Image (cartoon, helix red, strand yellow):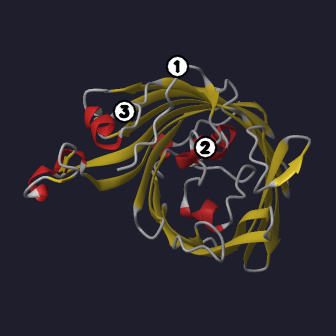
Amino acid sequence: MLVPLAGTTQAQRVAKYGADFLAGGVGARALAMGGAHVALAGDADAVYWNAAGLMAMEFPQAAYMHAERFAGSVSFDYGAGAMPLTDRSTVALAFFRSGVNDIKNTLDAWDPERNQPKPNPGDFITSFSAADYAFFLGYARQLRPSLSVGVTAKLIHRSIGSFASAWGYSFDASARWVGERYRFGVNLQDLSTMLQSWSVDSGNLANLETVFGDELPSGGTELVLPVARLGAARVQPMASGLLTWAVDLDLAFDGQDANAFDLAGVSLHPRLGAEYTHREVASLRLGLARIRQVRGEGLDLTPTVGAGVHYGGISVDYGFGDFAGVVSELGFSHRVSLSYEFRKEAYKRPSVD
């Protein structure tokens, strides 16, 4: 059993992948477009991508997504709800869970004195889950007809069975500008620097030292550094539909330079996406979720595709892609999301005076 805890000291350290379970994004539409969505976010999913985009909503909306990652070994679930408050403000709530279930704990099945398994070892094997949770509270405010801003407060909880757990918190700040054809967005993710404080139950890990001779890990604090997410999109009306192009660029300061474009210590993560929507009923999408330069390997591209149907306020979307690159052995990722817009006049956002 592997227990990836925070380390053996109480010192703070920078975690390159401290909140990586959120890095894949939400919403099958956005993911099918390669995650190029910072400028396009305009529904309940905007609480994740760019809270300022919540101002694009006219009616309350609920959304849900399920995804299987790493050949189905990791399940990911997300749900969100958003509601216009006034003519110039919107609020949203979101919940995330990413976990691996039914992990076998064999520590109690080993007899360290005899240096072999106990008789009937299956009687001593138990199971546990390793899961990450997140809770988002987003708020958007319109400053001008074309400009809105937003903020998202985030609470993170991570657990490794009964062995260890962590709590973390931070907030994002965002802005979105909408023109006739073009959209621009920025999301300063974890602007406050996310703090994750780990605690370890040494009693549950006592056998780790006895069986393997390993030093027991202790709690500590991880720091997840900010990421600047920039986005631009162009919306092009056509005779029978709408063609949308989008590009995002993440600027990260966490030292992930081995598998990314790097500029003076800042790693660059571009994403591209395109969508064609026919008469507001059916959509086809494709994108590149990852464009990176892998040291010693060359250029690595991660393509995505997807589709969606929309009717009467209901949208069903599907996205498909290789979670970790074309040549990966980690399997493909399927994402399905459902959203519903409550299109009743009583719920509609009040008109701007």
Residue ID for mark 2? 17
Q: Is residue 260 above or below residue 322?
A: above
Residue sitting at 70 percent across and 28 percent down? 191
Residue 243 seen anywhere in this rendered image of the structure: no
Report the side of 77 relative to 304 (left or right).
left
Residue 126, position as x, y percentages in the image: 18, 50
Q: Is residue 181 above or below residue 168?
A: below
Residue sitting at 59 percent across and 72 percent down? 321
Residue ID for mark 1? 10
- Residue 164: numbered disc: 3
Q: Earlier in the sequence, mark 2 or mark 3?
A: 2
- Residue 224: numbered disc: none
Residue 302 seen anywhere in this rendered image of the structure: yes
Q: Classify 10 Å Cα crowding around label 1: few (below 14), some (14-19), many (20 and above).
A: some
Q: CA distance from mark 2 to mark 1?
A: 19 Å
Name the element at disc 2. loop
Name the element at disc 3. strand
Q: Classify 10 Å Cα crowding around label 3: few (below 14), some (14-19), many (20 and above).
A: many
| Amino acid type of the residue that numbered disc 3 sits on in the rendered structure | Ala
Residue sitting at 76 percent across and 70 percent down? 300
| Amino acid type of the residue that numbered disc 2 sits on in the rendered structure | Tyr
Q: Earlier in the sequence, mark 2 or mark 1?
A: 1
- Tag nearer the camera, 2 or 1: 1
Q: CA distance from mark 3 to mark 1?
A: 14 Å
Total residue callouts? 3
Report the side of 244 relative to 336 (left or right).
right
